[in-house]
Image (cartoon, rainbow, N blue to C red):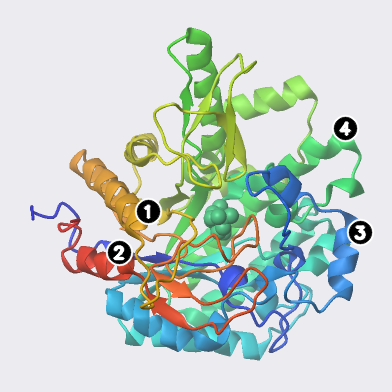
Amino acid sequence: MGKSVFPENFLWGGATSANQCEGAWDEDGKGMSVADCSTYKKHVNVADYKGQHSITSQDIEEAMESKDVHKYGKRHGIDFYHRYKEDLDLFQEMGFKTLRVSIPWTRIYPTGMETEPNEAGLRHYEELFTEMKKRGIEPLVTLHHYEMPLYLCNHYDGWYRREVISLFLKFCQTVFKRYKGLVTYWLTFNEIDSVFRHPFTTIGLVEDRYPADKWEEIIYQSVHNQFVASAMATKLLHEIIPGAQMGCMITRTLTYPENCHPKNMLQALKENRKNYFYSDVQVRGEYPKHIKCEWERKGIHVEFGPEDEKMLKAYPVDFVSFSYYMSRVTSFDTANKEMVSGNLTSGIKNPYLETTEWNWQVDPTGLCISLIELYDRYQKPVFVVENGLGSRDRVEEDGSIQDDYRIQYFREHIQAIADAIAEGVDVMGYTPWGCIDMVSMSTCQMSKRYGFIYVDVDDEGNGSYERKRKKSFYWYKKVIASNGADLD
Ligand code: BG6
C-alpha cells in the first residue's frame, strides 16, 4: 500500500437525492413535486432516454389523479424517510465523512406559495442532520434536485416565470436559518445543464404548453432565472451562515473528438464549451460571449432584470461540483456510425471504452481530465458529488452480493482522482452516487443499482426493503480508512 495523496480532511462519502430514496411522497404535509409524476415503464428500451423522459400535460393530469406508488416509482423510493437512522448507521460503519442529501422544496413549502413553512418537514431534516452529525457525517445539501413543486409547473410555468425566483429564495432563507449550525456545505441546482435534456424535471416545463418556435428561448429564460436564484441564494447563505459554502453542480459531459480532424476538434471544443456555459455563469459570474452570439444568431431574447448582471458578478459560488459517469465522442460526420446514449446525451461509440447495460461509456481517465480542466478553468476547489456504476446485482444463495465489477469501477475512478490531485488539483471530496440502492432517476427502475448497500425492492416497489452490505461495502470502508491509499 502506497502513501495517500488525498488531503487529511478529504470528504469521503456518498450521494442521494430525496425524491429517489425517501418515499413517503404524500406524508407529513408534503406537496406533489415533478418527481412524483415520473413513471416506471416496464417495456421500454432502457437505453432510449428520449422515450422515457417525454412528458405531456395529459401525463401530469393522470399523475395528479393517481395514488399509485408502483407505477410512480419515486413515490416509494427505498423508504429512507422512515429508515434513515438504520442507513446512517451503515454509512457510519463505512466511515463516511459526508453524505449528500437534498431537501425537497415541497416538504417545506408544499406548493411553493405558502407564507408559513411546514413545521413537520423542517423538523424532519433537523432530526436527519442532527443524527448525521452525531455519527460524524457532515451534511452536503442540495437545494434543488429535480424536485420542484408541481403547483409551480402548472401555475407559474416552472422556472420560466420570474416570480419563482423569490419563491425559491423564501425556501432557501427558511432552511438556511433553521439549519444554521448543522449544515456548512450546500449546492444550488443539481445538474443545471440538464435543462435541454429533460426540461420538465429540471425547470418544470412541459413542451406541449408552449409554441415550438419559442421553446429554446423559454428554456434559456428559465435557466437564466435559475442563475439569478443561484447568485441570490449564495448571497443569502453567506449572510445567514457565515463560513458556509455554496457550490454549483453540473453534469460533466466530457466530449472527445472522434479523431484529430480539425473539424472534429472544433466540434468537440464547442460542445465542451456549451457544457461549461452553466458553470461559467455561476463561477465567473458572467455569461460567456458565445452564448450571447448564439442568441443573436437565433433571434433569442432573454429578459434580464436591471440588477441581474450585477448580482451574478457579485455572488459566484464558492466551489465547483459535478457529476461524472461517462464521456462521449462527437464527429462532424455521424453518417453510418454506431451511436450510444447515456445519461441522456448521445454520441458516437468510443472503440476504446466498455459500455454498461444502459449504454453509458465507462471512462475513468475522463474523470481525471475533467478534474484538471475544471480546476484549471476556475481555480476553485472541485468536488465530485456523483459518480458510479448502475448495474444489476445478484443476491447469492448465502445472501452475499459479489459486486466485483463495482469495486473495479470505483478503484479506477478513485485512482483517477488521486492522479488529478497529484497534478495539483484541489479536490474537496468524493460522494459516489446512490451509495445505497435507490430508484433510478431516468428509468425509475430499482434494478439499476448503484449502491454499496443492497435494498430488497423490485422495479414495482415490492419487497422487504431490507438492507444488505455488498462486497463493495467492505472495500469502500477500507478505502476510506486508508484515506484512499488502499485500493486493492
Ligand atoms: C444524475 C442525477 O444524472 O445521475 C441523479 O443527478 C441520477 O439523480 C444519477 O440518479 C444516475 O442516473 P440514473 O438515471 O441511472 O438514476
The reply to whether residue 145 is visible in this rendering is yes
**Amino acid at the residue labelled 4:** Asp
| Earlier sequence position, callout 2 versus callout 4 | 2
Say left or right for 277 vs 321.
right
| Earlier sequence position, callout 3 versus callout 4 | 3
- Where is residue 387? Give x, y as percent: 42, 53
| Alpha carbon separation for disc pair 3 and 1 | 39 Å
| Earlier sequence position, callout 4 versus callout 1 | 4
Q: At x 37% / y 53%, what residue is drawn?
A: 383
Q: Nearer the viewer, mark 3 or mark 2?
A: 3
**Amino acid at the residue labelled 3:** Gln
Within 10 Å of disc 1 (Cα), the crowding (few <14, some 14-19, many 20+) is many
| Alpha carbon separation for disc pair 3 and 2 | 44 Å
> Mark on residue 11?
2
Q: Residue under circle 1?
A: 383
Q: Residue furthest top?
A: 262
**Amino acid at the residue labelled 1:** Phe
Q: At x 74% / y 20%, what residue is drawn?
A: 297
Tell whether label 4 touches label 2 (CB within 8 Å).
Answer: no
Q: Is residue 420 above or below residue 105?
A: above
| Alpha carbon separation for disc pair 3 and 4 | 22 Å
- Helix or strand or loop: what does disc 3 sit on? helix
The quadrant of the picture occupied by the C terminus is bottom left
| Alpha carbon separation for disc pair 4 and 1 | 38 Å
| Earlier sequence position, callout 2 versus callout 1 | 2
> Mark on residue 213?
4
| Earlier sequence position, callout 3 versus callout 1 | 3
